[in-house]
Amino acid sequence: MLESSLVTLLQNNSGGTASIKENENLTQVFVLILNEAIKNVGAKSGFLFFLDEKNNLKSFGADSLSLSEQARLLANYSFQEKRSFRIKKNSTVPGSKMDADQTYIACYLGDDATSIGVFLLAGINHFENFSTNDFELISVYSKTLSRLLKDSLVLPEKGEIFLHFT
């Protein structure tokens, strides 16, 4: 009975993209994911970007109001190009002609078939730039998150989230 009421967390959109409906339980999970990633690499802030109903990238983060224009540009570039990258402070921001005001890690969420969003970390404490190891760690973290999002189901009436192991 329960299994027949479950729907996929990701809602397929046109063009191989997927959006996520807002959900209080999911918000709590995203806060945990962001906080752990920030702690693991010593980032100053972190954001998740997902598509909204109009196919625009929408940011989710502890302080989305402080999201810089550079961070938005990087998230859009990562999503459009389906690429993950590390940007050093004062290097050129991909997709623009401006220099980065801080270091960034942007990781594409999705695979060849479905684009889900972007995981972005901005700034680092105690150093000038994220290391290659930081980038590799967050890349694995992002690939795992992509897989979990694709395998998640929701009970719409209660907003409960379940993992479907395949």
Image: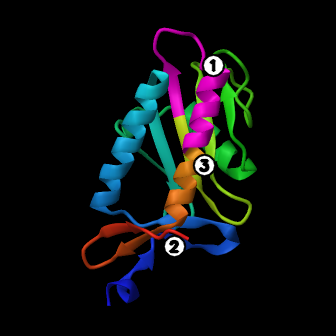
- Of 96 and 33, nearer the camera is 33
Q: Which mark is residue 11?
A: 2
- Which of the 4 quarters of the picture holds residue 83? top right
Quadrant containing the C terminus is bottom right
Q: Farthest residue in the front direction?
A: 166
Real-space Cα separation, disc 3 to disc 1, in angstroms: 19 Å
- Which secondary structure, mark 1? loop
Magenta-tinted stretch? 121-141
**Of marks 2 and 1, which one's residue comes earlier in the chain?**
2
| Residue type at tag 1 | Ser
Image height check: is 106 above or below 104? below
Real-space Cα separation, disc 3 to disc 2, in angstroms: 19 Å
Residue 94 coordinates in the image, percent (x, y): 73, 33
Real-space Cα separation, disc 2 to disc 1, in angstroms: 35 Å
Q: Residues within 10 Å of mark 2 (few under 14, many from 20)?
A: some
Asked whether, in this view, residue 27 is left or right of residue 126, the answer is: left
| Residue type at tag 3 | Lys
Observer able to see residue 142: yes
| Residue behind mark 1 | 131
Magenta span includes 126: yes
- Of 91 and 1, nearer the camera is 1
The mark closer to the camera, 2 or 1, is: 1
Asked whether, in this view, residue 61 is left or right of residue 120, the answer is: left
Task: Check if mark 3's residue and mark 1's residue have beta carbons within 8 Å.
Answer: no
Q: Residues within 10 Å of mark 3 (few under 14, many from 20)?
A: some
Residue at 57%, 35% in the rendered image: 138
Image height check: is 17 above or below 57? below
Q: Which mark is residue 143?
A: 3
| Residue type at tag 2 | Gln
- Which secondary structure, mark 2? strand
